Every structure is written in C-alpha cells, then in structure tokens.
Image (cartoon, helix red, strand yellow):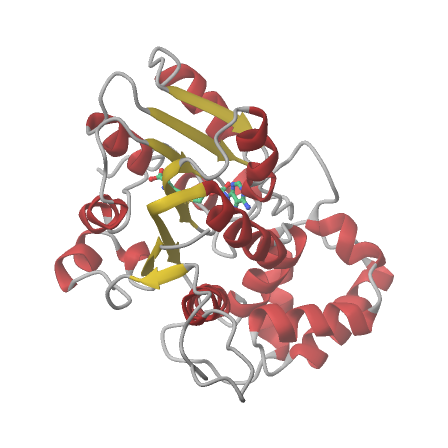
Amino acid sequence: MEDRNEHRPVLLDEVLEALNIQPEGFYFDGTFGRGGHAGAILERLGSEARLLAMDKDLEAISFAEKNFAHDERFEIRQGSFAMMAEWLKDAGLTGKMDGVFFDLGVSSPQLDNADRGFSFMKEGPLDMRMDTGRGQSATEWLADADEQVISDVIRDFGEERFHRRIAAAIVSKRLSEKLQTTLQLAGLIEKVVPGREKGKHPATRTFQAIRIFMNRELDDLQKGLAQAVDALKIGGRLAVISFHSLEDRRVKRFIRDKAEGKRLPLDLPVQYEKTNAELKIVGKAIRPGADEVKKNTRSRSATLRVAEKIKS
Ligand SMILES: C[S@@+](CC[C@H](N)C(=O)[O-])C[C@H]1O[C@@H](n2cnc3c(N)ncnc32)[C@H](O)[C@@H]1O
C-alpha cells in the first residue's frame, strides 16, 4: 500500500539538471516539504557546499530537524521564502547563490492529513493554513469576511465562474451555522454550482482560491522571485515548479520581463536591443512525462521553468 505521508518529488531529474548542481555550490530550497528535492540536491553536494531551506509548515520543519539535522551542510528555517533575502543578507550570501528552487503549493502530507483542512474529499476542520502558528484559519475568515470580498477571492484565485453564488451561499449559511469543516463547505458548493466540469469536483476551484488567499501565496511568489534574482550569482540558476496557471503565468511573466531587460529610449540607435537583462531563459517550460504522471498523479499539472542569472 502507498505510504500516505509519502511525498514523491516532482520532476526530480529535471530539477537537478536545471539547477546545474556545482559540487561546492550554495543552494536555497524555499519549499522544503519532506525534503524530496533537498535530499537529492545534498547527495550531489560536496563537504564545503551548503543547502539553506525554508518552509512555512511546522511539520515540514520537524521532519527536517529529525531527518536532516545531522548534515552540517544543511540548515532550515521556518517561514516564507519571501523572507529569504533577510537570511541571505545576514549570512553574507546575497549574490553568491548557485541555485534557488521553489516547488510551489501544498505537499502530499498536507493534502493527505485531513486535520489540515486542505482537502475537500476528507472531513476535517476548515483550516487551510500552511503555517498553523499564525493568522486566521479559513473557518475564522469565512465567519466574518464581507460577501463581496469572498466572491472576489473565489473569482481571482480560483477563476471560478460561479463565485457570486458560492459567496452568497456561504454568507447565507453562516447566519444559521458556522462553517467549520471541509465537507460542510464542499457540500454547500456542490449544491450551488450547476453541472460538473469533467474530472473536477465542483469545490476544486473554491478550495484552491481560499488556500491561495489565506496563505498569501501569490504575493509571496512575487517577492520570492524578486529576491531569488538578487540571491543568485552570475551563472546561478532559478528553477520554479508551479501547479496551476495563476502561478505559472506569474513565473513566466517574471522571467520573461527580467530576460528582456529595460528597453532603451526609442531614439537611440540600439533601440530594442536587450541591454539590461538580468536573466536568460533556459530551455522551454518542462512538463512531466506520461510515466511520471502515471506513478504520481499529483505531478500532472506541474510546470518547471528555469532561468540563469546573467547580470547583476
Ligand atoms: C509541493 S511541496 C514541496 C515538496 C518538496 N519539494 C519535496 O520534495 O518534499 C510545497 C511546500 O512548500 C511550502 N510552501 C509553500 N509556499 C511557501 C512559501 N511561500 N514559503 C515557504 N514554504 C512554502 C508548503 O508548506 C509545502 O510544504
């Protein structure tokens, strides 16, 4: 039987190649999870190399402390990778990193543990925080949030057509009953969303939206990407795996803008020449092959994008 806490690292070989691992290099993994990628990176690193890691999730940190603490090349801190710059600055590593890696979204253990409230398939408290040590749970947020705000969140972060109906149903339900569990919310959504998208539970988009909002995932991504560029040395690699189009669009646009650089004024002879580009795009977006998707269905929506720093 499959180990329910198992987390299979997605696009592992592709990530290792993308990072162009230097045996004595400095690496940053902003989304440690259960260390699937981190472990494989460490296997390729020599004794003077370093791997710094972060995760918002307290269970991910405990796992790392238990299983990786013996490795002197490795260090982990709890928090968002949007705080990476501070750590690297204190460590004197800004502009010195050989690789920065983000494997976005939630991990299998987070999804599989009903108590975390991420899954609309399993009954559990409606929490949805990656960092359970701070901020509001989804239950607390849904109990007070303005109907318009709920509707906007579901539209913007879930790209859900029926955002107004769902928000209205939530607000009407909470007059009589607190929304406390995952299946309670999923059932409510099922009742108001007409028809079914093929292969998609009607609550998929709303759960995604609330999760992204509660964890400020897109804000953190934008900050993390900008800090990653400052963190890298020239020739260093940025590799990002995203799992839905909202993330991937941001990663793609960010890399493209940094690879185009600032264009010079039109009256200069070198107009449109790409001058100040900080990044170079490395290859095309990489998707898992049929074999990987068969072994690990969660990899099916993954997209890996890679860039190299070419200028400070
Ligand atoms: C897809 S999993 C990573 C799995 C990991 N690569 C592995 O092989 O085990 C994503 C992890 O990133 C964490 N996470 C997501 N966004 C984060 C952020 N902005 N800062 C820090 N951790 C984040 C989640 O808590 C989760 O543990």
Left or right: residue 102 versus residue 37 is right
Quadrant in the picture for residue 211: bottom right
Residue 183 appears in the picture as rendered: no
The N terminus: image quadrant: top left
Q: 37 and 34: which one is in front?
A: 37
Q: 164 and 61: which one is in front?
A: 61
Quadrant in the picture for residue 40: top left
Left or right: residue 75 versus residue 164 is left
User: Looking at the image, which residue is at 59% across and 44% down?
Assistant: 82
Residue most toward the front?
269
Q: 307 and 204: which one is in front?
A: 307
Residue most toward the top?
70
Q: Position of residue 196 (x, y in %)?
A: 46, 80
Q: Where is residue 258 in the image (x, y as percent from the top left)?
A: 46, 65
Position above or below: 234 against 65: below
Residue most toward the bottom?
267
Position above or below: 76 against 239: above
User: Looking at the image, which residue is at 18% across and 55% down?
Assistant: 292
Position above or below: 189 against 54: below
Q: Where is residue 130 in the image (x, y as percent from the top left)?
A: 58, 41
Please state the total of marks drawn on the protein image.
0
Position above or below: 282 against 100: below
Residue 131 appears in the picture as rendered: yes
Q: 57 and 238: which one is in front?
A: 238
Quadrant in the picture for residue 85: top right
User: Looking at the image, which residue is at 24% across and 39% down?
Assistant: 2
Q: Position of residue 65 (x, y in %)?
A: 44, 17
